[in-house]
Every structure is written in structure tokens, then in C-alpha cells.
Amino acid sequence: MRSVLFSLVMSFAAVAAFSQTRSFESLYPGIRGEDRAKVYSEDGLLLSEEGASLKLLPASTGVNISEPVLRRNPSFVVESLRVIPYNSPSPALLHVYNALGKVSRLKGRLYHSATRNQDIPLFEEASRIRIIDSSRTQALNDPPNASAIPRSETVHLRLKDVNFGNSYYQAEMSYNQRSILYSLSNFRSLSYGIIPVIRENRFVAQLYIEPITDGFLVYSVAAANVSGFISSRIHIPSAIEKRLAVIIEWLVDGLKNS
């Protein structure tokens, strides 16, 4: 009898959750026509701006997506908006959480290098790490798939970037029933050779994921605070766009394989 009651309760909860799922139009009533078509395409809708102007924030998320971006007083901001069709008859944010946990799958993902005129791996190595001290870290395996999502979680990553070498990030995840917010920030400087390009904690990428009526809405924003000297020599918006695109495709592939 108890198992029957439990099943009924879970069924009602699932129906209630589905009934609260928002539509794309309710979050973005002003995006129509060509821009809306881009949102549903494989490339998504992409905007790149100087300064700290955010134009694609979803409505009424209940989480503060913009504050970590704006408080860094960024020189450049790149926003992306995409809807990923459901790959499962029972899509859930748990699939998103487990996809985000597979950090090693960032290794070897390709991007197009204009200077080399070929597709090359952006991250030559990728793993979670444990920080031992200020100069030492230990690589960790990806965790097994979880059966529940924690309210919040903080992990550290090492990505061997084709341009910036060993890059160290802090990843913070927060969950609020409706959505997951995943945030990356560099806890060590990103350098090109011996030249620091983005100082410690001056880069941030935010991924906001919410199940809507016809897919997972993925709003992402990446921003960096760099000096005029660096920005005059390295096209930072292009560098950010490529990394953001690779991270989004990593999430998309993870959802397809969930």
C-alpha cells in the first residue's frame, strides 16, 4: 500500500513539475524570426559586445546570473542562447548535472584555428583536480552518474589549453528545482607563454540551463577583464567565443549521451 501511495505522489509531482515548465516565448517574447531560428540551430544565437551590456538574459530566473559578470567590470562580453531538443522521453536536470560532471570529455574537442586554417583540439588535457597546495594539484577521475542533484557544489578543474597552457578554474554549480547555474572562473592567471593575458579571477563563464516546453534552454555568458595592451594584441572576443562554443558543445554531447 505504501509503495502505491508513493508512486501516486511521485506521479502527481511529475505532473505538477511539467505544468510549471515555461515556454520559450514566456522567457523571450521579443525574440522572433531569424533570431529565433538561430536559437534553435546548432550554432545558437551569439552576441559579442564591448563593456558589460547583457542583452539575452532570460526573464524571472530566480538566480543572479549577471552579478558575477558585472562585478568584474569586463572589457568584453559574449552571450549565447540555444535550445537543445530533448533526447529522452523523460528529460530532467539530473541529466544536465551528470553531463557537467564529465570534465574529461572536454579533452580533444576541436575548434577552427584561423591562423593554422585547420581544426585543432582546444583542450589537450582536461580533468577535475584536488588542490594540494599553492603549486601542486592532483588529477581526479570523473565521478559516476549521480542519482540526485546537490543544492550546490564547488569543484576545481585543470584544462591544458592550446593557447594558454595549463589553465585552472573553479566551477560552482547551484540548483533550484527549475534550473542549474554553472559558473567557471579562473583562480590562476591565463597566460600566453610568459605573458599574463587574463589575471586571476578576471574571467567568468556562466551557463544557465532550464527545461522548457520543447528542449533545454541554455543561456551562457562569458566575460573577461583585460588590459588595453593585451586586447590590442590578442582578439579576446574571438578567444572567448571559441571557448564558450566548445563548452556548450560539450554539454550538448553530454545530454545526447545521457
Image (cartoon, helix red, strand yellow):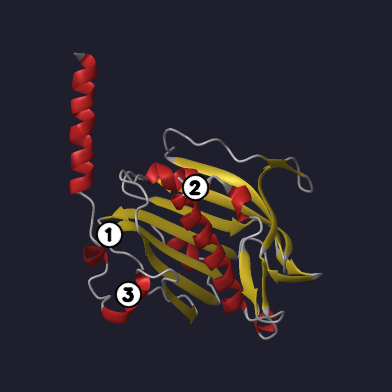
Side of 206 relative to 225 (left or right): left
Q: Position of residue 186 (x, y in %)?
A: 63, 59
Residue found 41% across the figure and 57% down from its top: 208
Side of 170 relative to 33 (left or right): right
Mark found first going from the N terminus, 3 or 1: 3
Q: Are marks 2 and 3 in contact (CB under 8 Å)?
A: no
Q: CA distance from mark 3 to mark 1?
A: 23 Å
Q: Is residue 84 depicted above or below 77 in this figure?
A: above
Residue linked to disc 2: 99
Mark found first going from the N terminus, 2 or 3: 3
Q: Position of residue 90 (x, y in %)?
A: 31, 43
Q: Position of residue 158 (x, y in %)?
A: 68, 52
Quarter of the image for residue 22 reads bottom left
Residue linked to disc 3: 37
Mark found first going from the N terminus, 2 or 1: 1
Q: Residue furthest right?
A: 194
Q: Residues within 10 Å of mark 3 (few under 14, many from 20)?
A: few
